[in-house]
Each structure stands twice: as structure tokens, then as C-alpha cells.
Image: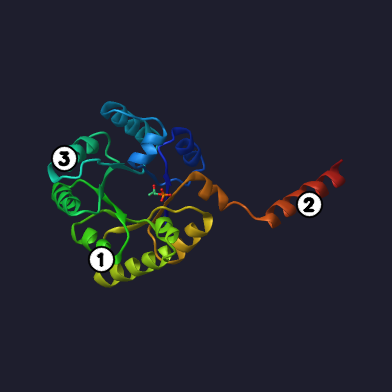
């Protein structure tokens, strides 16, 4: 399973990259706004900075909701760097745009996916990635992980090439369960990745090793 970091924060992207386990980055308009990146050129420049740090795929989201607007934006975004993946919302015009980008050889990430039916459409349109938002499903007391299982089963039976990118991942257990249930990629905040490190027995064990070493060696 690939690890993407879900942020537009350059220092967090650098920190995840420095771990040596980072396969890519996802962003969205909310994450860009959170970093104070506003205005068309500033957004494009920011994506270029992210692509300078990361070799893997970087999802850059369109903000248009009509086909022509998405095409125009997507073509500009895809020219920033070869690792840009154009992120397109799961709406009718979005599916049309993904189909267009597929024909043009521009890679896409179909975002805001909340059902297996939507995931089938994204795959039919040729999306490179489909992004089911598991945390937001859990937020309304449905089962986000069940959606990952359902999509994984359907894509395996139907031999779809689209990669399942578990998104809206909030914690380390979401990462572990995504791995168990067939996600190809998980995208999450840096703190969810760092949370995987934690185990009290590791801390206790390390303290004991160091104390024993000190006792023996002075
Ligand atoms: O990858 C999608 C993500 O940015 C949404 O996460 O936590 O806002 O639901 P969240």
C-alpha cells in the first residue's frame, strides 16, 4: 500500500518525505486555503513547490464544476510537472471530464466518493485513482471501511485498473484497516502516519535497553 500525505503544508510534506516512506501527496481547496494559498498563480506555484519535494503523484484539484472549466484547469495543472494528477469531483460533469482526460492521457483522481456505485463510474471513466472518504462516512455513523471492502471486491471481480485511494483518513487504525481491506493507497495527515510509530512496550523496552547499557558501561 502506498502512503500519501494529505496536506498542502510544505514542512509537513518535507517531514513525511524525509521518513523515506512517502509515495505522494493529495491536496484539496480546503487544504490550500488552510495554508493561506490564494489566487490562481500562487496555487500553481505552490503545486510546483510540492512537486519539487516529492517524486510521487501529487493530486491537484480543479475548482470548476462545469466540463469546459475542468478541462481548462486540468490541462494547466497537468503541465506543472509530470507527477501531477488532476483531482476531479464525483459529479456528472466530473465523470465527463475524467473520460476526456483519460483519452488525452492525463491522469486523474476522482474525489468525494461515498458509494460503490460512484466508484464503478469513476473506474469506467478511467480514473487513475478513486478517493472514498472513509472518515466523513464514519462521521455520520456509517461504516467507511465497508466502502473500501466493497470497492476492492468490485474492482477485483471486474478487473478495473483504478487504484483505491482511501481518503479522509484520520487516525492510525484507519491506515491499518485500509491496508487489511485492499486499499492501494492511503492518504492522511502526517500525525496519523506518525501515530503508527507508537507502542508503550517499545518505549518501555528502549528505556530498559538504554538503562542496562548505562549500568554495564557507566
Ligand atoms: O483526502 C480527503 C481529505 O482531505 C478529507 O479529509 O478529514 O477533511 O474529511 P477530511
Image quadrant occupied by the C terminus: top right
Q: Earlier in the sequence, mark 3 or mark 1?
A: 3
Q: Residue at x 20, y 35 (%)?
A: 76
Quadrant in which residue 82 is drawn: top left
Q: CA distance from mark 3 to mark 1?
A: 25 Å
Residue corresponding to mark 2: 208
User: Residue 160: horizontal and vertical position, in percent?
Assistant: 25, 64
Q: Secondary structure at mark 3?
A: helix
Task: Give 71 or 206, whichever is nearer the viewer.
Answer: 71
Residue 135 image point, x, y percent = 43, 56
Residue at the far bottom in the pictured view: 157
Q: Which mark is residue 204?
A: none
On the rendered image, what quadrant is the N terminus found in? bottom left
| Disc nearest the viewer among 3 and 2 | 3
Q: Nearer the viewer, residue 143 or 82?
A: 143
Q: Residues within 10 Å of mark 2 (few under 14, many from 20)?
A: few
Q: CA distance from mark 3 to mark 2?
A: 61 Å
2 or 1: tag closer to the N-terminus: 1
Q: Which residue is mark 3?
A: 69
Is the residue marked 1 within 8 Å of ligand 1, measured from its CB?
no
Front-most of residues 126 and 105 = 126
Which numbered disc, 3 or 2, marks the residue that appears first in the sequence?
A: 3
What is the distance, in whole Å, between disc 2 and disc 1 at their CAs?
Answer: 53 Å
The residue labelled by disc 1 is 117
Q: Are marks 3 and 2 in contact (CB under 8 Å)?
A: no
Q: Secondary structure at mark 2?
A: helix
Q: Are marks 3 and 1 in contact (CB under 8 Å)?
A: no
State yes or no: discs 2 and 1 in contact (Cβ < 8 Å).
no
Amino acid at each position: 500500500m502506498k502512503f500519501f500525505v494529505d496536506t498542502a503544508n510544505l514542512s509537513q510534506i518535507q517531514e513525511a518525505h524525509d521518513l523515506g516512506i512517502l509515495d505522494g501527496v493529495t491536496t484539496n481547496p480546503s487544504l490550500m486555503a488552510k495554508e493561506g494559498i490564494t489566487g490562481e498563480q500562487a496555487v500553481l506555484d505552490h503545486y510546483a513547490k510540492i512537486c519539487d519535494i516529492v517524486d510521487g503523484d501529487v493530486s491537484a484539484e480543479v475548482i470548476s464544476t462545469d466540463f469546459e472549466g475542468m478541462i481548462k484547469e486540468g490541462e494547466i495543472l497537468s503541465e506543472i510537472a509530470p507527477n501531477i494528477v488532476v483531482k476531479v469531483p464525483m459529479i456528472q460533469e466530473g465523470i465527463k471530464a475524467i473520460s476526456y482526460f483519460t483519452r488525452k492521457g492525463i491522469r486523474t483522481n476522482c474525489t468525494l466518493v461515498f458509494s460503490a456505485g460512484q466508484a464503478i463510474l469513476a473506474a469506467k471513466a478511467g480514473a487513475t485513482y478513486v478517493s472514498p472518504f472513509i472518515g466523513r462516512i464514519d462521521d455520520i455513523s456509517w461504516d467507511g471501511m465497508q466502502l473500501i471492502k466493497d470497492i476492492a471486491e468490485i474492482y477485483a471481480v471486474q478487473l478495473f485498473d483504478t487504484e483505491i485511494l482511501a481518503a479522509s483518513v484520520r487516525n492510525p487504525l484507519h491506515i491499518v484497516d485500509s491496508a487489511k481491506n485492499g486499499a492501494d493507497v492511503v492518504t492522511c495527515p502526517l500525525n496519523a502516519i506518525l501515530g503508527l510509530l507508537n507502542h508503550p512496550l517499545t518505549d518501555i523496552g528502549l528505556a530498559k535497553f538504554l538503562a542496562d547499557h548505562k549500568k554495564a558501561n557507566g
